[in-house]
Image (cartoon, rainbow, N blue to C red):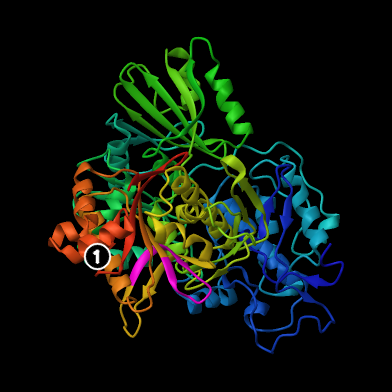
Amino acid sequence: AAHDAGVIHRDVKPANLIRLPSGRIKVTDFGIARVLGSELVKTQAGDVLATPMYGSPEQLLGGEIDGRSDLFSVGIVLYLALTGRAPFGGRNLAELISSILNNEPAAPRSLNHEIPEGLEAVLMRTLSKKREARFATAGDLARALRPFAAGNVVPGSAVTANLSSSPASEVEWQATRVSAPFPFAESVSGSGEFVLPADDNAPVLTGLPPDAARALVQVVSGWAARPMGRVVVQDLLNRLLEFPLHAEPYSGAVRVGEQAYLLLHGGLLLGAVDARASNLPGDEVVQNLPLEATVELHPRPESLDPGVLPLLAALLQKRRVRHADLDSSFVNLPALGEKLRSECFDGLLVLRRDESIAWILIVHGRTALALYAGSWAGAPLGASWQSWVSDLVVKASVEERSGGPLFASYRRLFPDFRIAVEKETEPLASVGASTSFSFGGSRRLTSKQTGGTHRLVASETGTRGGTRGGGAPQSVLDQALAADEARRYLQFLLNDLPRLIVERGKTESLKYVASWIPLVKSAILHHRLPRPQSAESDFFDLVTFDADGKALHLASRVARGTPQALEEFIERVLQAKGARIKTGDVGGAILFAPTFDAEAAEVYRTATAPEGEKKKSWTFGAIEAATHYEGFVRMGARRGFHLLLVTVEPDGFKLLSP
C-alpha cells in the first residue's frame, strides 16, 4: 500500500514491525520514509538513513532507491526469522557494509533444513545485490510467499517455475502440508546432563538442586565461560548493558568473584544471586558487589531462545500463579500444554513430585528449556514432558513472571530524567491541596488517594536528560519507565506523605518536609546533584526543586536498610546540604528500603538526637525546645534537615521514622 502511494519506508527491520493479536503484521515508523518525486523529505546526497544491518546495497552506497530497496530489507528480516541468523554480518560497521555489498549469504537450507527449497529460492532472489534481479513489487513477493504462509508446502518441495526469471504471479507451487518448526541448532552444555527430546527439541537439564536459585547457578555456570580477568565491576557492567550500534546487547550471565552471578539481557539487569546465600534479594547482591573483582562471562548459548533469560530470572522472584495444584490424576496436563501453546504463553509450568521439582520454561507457547531437580525415576526426561506427565502422579502450577528488572537497571536507563510538577492553585496550607505532575509521552493516568484530598495526574510529557538509556529502544524505555520505583517515590512524596504527616499531627515537627512540598516545581530521577563551585556531585534517586532551582528534598533507595547504608546516605546528604548551606537548600531527606535492620535504628537515633543533648549546650537546648523538630539532623544552630525512613512494600509505603 505504501509503495502504491509512492512512499518508500527505507528502514524495515524487526523493531518497526508489530504483531497484532490477530496475527497480522503492521509496519510502523515511517519517520525516514521518502515520497518518490517529492521534496517533502529531502536529504543530502550520500546520506544513509537506515539501520545498516537491514539496509540494501543501494541505500548503503547513497544511491537512488525504490520499493525494491524495502524488499531487500524484508528479505533480511525473513532470513533472520527462518534461520536464526542474519544473512550479513561483521565485527564492525565497515565489515557489515562490506558483507552486504559483496558477500552472498549462506543458503538458508544449510542453516535450517526444514525450509522448503521453494522458500529458499524466494529468499535468495529477494536478497539479490542488483535491484532488477529482485521481485519487481511487494505484491509479487507477497504472492510468492503466500503458499508458505498458509502452511501448505513440504520441506524439500520444489517450485514448478524458475523464480530467477518468472514473475511471482505466474509461479505455481506444489501444495502439501508443511512440517513442524525447525529444531534448535545445537544442545546446551552444562554442569548437569543435557539431552534433546525427540519431539519439540527443547534442551533438558537434570540432576539440579531443588533450590531454584542454586539450580540457576548450576545452569548458567555450565555455559561456555569467557574469562575477563580482574576488572572494575561497574565499568564492565555498563559496557555489557549498552545497546551496541548494530548488534544485540549482551545476553547471558556474569560471574563476579566466586559467588555472585548476574543475569543480563536486552540492556537490563534481570536478576542476581549469591551462591553462598541464595535467598539474598537480587538488589542486595548488586549493592554488595565489590569495586573490583575477577569476572567471567557466560553468554547465553545460541541454541537457547532469548526469552529464556527473563524466565530464568523469574526463578529468583515471586511469580504470579495463574493455576495452582493441578493434579495429573484429574487434570489433562498435555491438553493444558496445548492450550498454553495456542495462547503463545510466556512463563513457567512447575511440576512437583514428592520432593522433586521441575521448572518447564515456556516461550511463546513452546518449551524452551526444562530443568529437573531431584529424582524423576520412571520419567523419560529425554522426551517432551507432555508425552509422559499423565503416567505419573504430579502436581502442576502455571506461573507468570511478575517482577521487573533490578533497580540498578533504572538508574542506568534513566539518568537525570526530568519531571515537570504542576500543582492546583489552592496552597497546601493544611497539606491537602491537589497535586499533579507530568513525565514523558502521550498517555494519561489518574489516581485518586483515599479521603479525596489529593489528585495525581501523570501526562508523560517530561524531558529526558543525560544519556538515553544506553541506546535502548523506545519500547524498552517505555516499559521500564512505567515500572521505575523512583516514580513511585515522587508520587509518595507529593501524595501520600502529606496525608500521613497531617494524620500524625506532625505538620510543625516535620516543617521542612511538609511546608516545602507545595514549592516543588520539578524533579529529577537518578540524579548526580552537582555541588556549587565544585567538580564533585552527590547521587540521589530523587531530587525535587522549586521554581528557582533550589533543591528541596533528596531521596535514595537501598536494597536493605543496614547501618552502613544509612550512614552512607546521611553522609551524602550532609555533603549536598553543606555545599548549599548559604542558600538553605534541602529541607528533607528520605531513605527508601524494603526492610531496615534493627541496628539501623541506633544510627538513626544518634544522627537525629537533639543537639543540646549531644553537646550539653544550653543554647542548643533552647533552640530544640523552641522548634520541637523531629527526625532532624542539625548542622549548626539554625541549619539542618529532616531525615525520614520509609519501607517500600508491594501495596504502598510505610513511614517508619520519625
Image: 300 above or below 340? below
The image position of residue 443, as x and y in percent, is: 67, 56
Q: Along the horizontal axis of the image, is 3 left or right of 589?
A: right
Q: Is residue 358 magenta?
A: no
Q: Secondary structure at mark 1?
A: helix
Q: Which residue is mark 1?
A: 571
Q: Along the horizontal axis of the image, is 289 left or right of 17?
A: left
- Going 58% across and 30% down the picture, which residue do you hit? 340
Q: Principal SS element in the magenta part? A: strand
Instruction: Say which quarter of the image contains residue 609.
Output: bottom left
The image position of residue 498, as x and y in percent, is: 48, 51
At label 1, the amino acid type is Glu
Q: Along the horizontal axis of the image, is 90 left or right of 77?
A: left
**441 vs 204, nearest the viewer:** 441
**347 vs 75, nearest the viewer:** 347
Which image quarter is the N terminus in?
bottom right
- Going 38% across and 37% down the picture, which residue do you hit? 315
Q: Is residue 412 visible?
A: yes
- Going 47% across and 27% down the picture, which residue do you hit? 384
Q: In the image, which residues are magenta? A: 538-552
Q: Is residue 539 magenta?
A: yes
The image position of residue 330, as x and y in percent, is: 52, 10
